[in-house]
Image: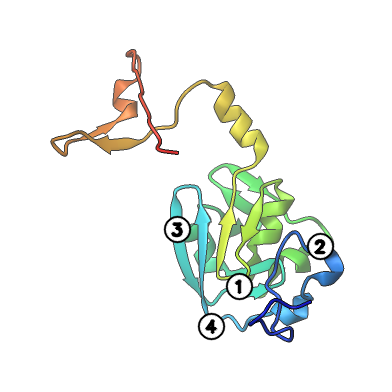
């Protein structure tokens, strides 16, 4: 039974709750790379042109990876500062293709979550459970900066070594 006013021939949007056979095939989801893709990672939101989406794969030009994630592709692998994750031997084509890197596959390979919207326009590259657990075990709040009532900015890092009371409130 089709709800009144809906077209049963309309394409179905990607939905993680659909069974595997109900999802669109990767071929139906390939885009030509001319659209704007938004990548959200940590505290940044980066718009990238020239990226290509193919199913759950996000091919990003090598030049844009650092801008979006802070990581860079080097001969030794995907690197951020002194940490490098090598491309698995024999699987190079899964990760690197010409001047593009499948950043979603790399992210999953590193054990981090990847989420995208149904259209593939917006991608979130999350932080893995190990990193979150490490941050929680340190018992140090992440640094942030907020204005006071006069508009002066105050950073939590400026209060290190002092006793600080943080009061929060939410309406929900």
Q: Nearer the viewer, residue 107 or 27?
A: 27
Which quadrant of the figure contains the C terminus?
A: top left
Mark 1: few/some/many CA within 10 Å (<14, 14-19, 20+): few
Between discs 4 and 1, the one toward the N terminus: 4
Q: Which residue is mark 3?
A: 45
Image disc number at residue 91 = 2
Q: Which residue is mark 4?
A: 34
Q: In the rendered image of this protein, does residue 62 appear above or below residue 107?
A: below
Label 3: element kind: strand
Q: Nearer the viewer, mark 2 or mark 3?
A: 3
Q: Nearer the viewer, mark 1 or mark 3?
A: 1
The residue sitting at the left extreme is: 150
- First in sequence, mark 4 or 3: give its number: 4
* Number of marks in the rendered image: 4
Residue behind mark 1: 119
Q: CA distance from mark 1 to mark 2?
A: 27 Å
Q: Earlier in the sequence, mark 2 or mark 4?
A: 4
- Other-residue count near label 2 (Cα within 10 Å), few / some / many at <14 / 14–19 / ≥20: few
Q: Earlier in the sequence, mark 1 or mark 2?
A: 2
């Amino acid at each position: 039974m089709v709800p009144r006013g809906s077209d049963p021939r309309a394409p179905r949007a990607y939905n993680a709750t659909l069974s595997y056979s109900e999802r669109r095939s990767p071929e139906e989801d390939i885009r030509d790379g001319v659209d704007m893709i938004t990548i959200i990672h940590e505290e940044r939101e980066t718009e990238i042109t020239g990226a290509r989406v193919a199913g759950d794969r996000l091919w990003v030009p090598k030049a844009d990876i650092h801008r979006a994630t802070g990581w860079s592709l080097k001969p030794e692998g995907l690197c951020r500062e002194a940490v490098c994750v090598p491309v698995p031997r024999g699987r190079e084509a899964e990760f690197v293709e010409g001047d593009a890197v499948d950043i979603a596959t790399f992210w999953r390979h590193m054990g981090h979550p990847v989420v995208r919207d149904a259209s593939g326009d917006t991608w979130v590259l999350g932080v893995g459970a190990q990193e979150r657990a490490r941050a929680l075990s340190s018992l140090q709040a992440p640094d942030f900066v907020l204005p006071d009532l006069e508009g002066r900015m105050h950073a939590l890092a400026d209060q290190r070594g002092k006793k600080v009371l943080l009061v929060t409130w939410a309406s929900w």
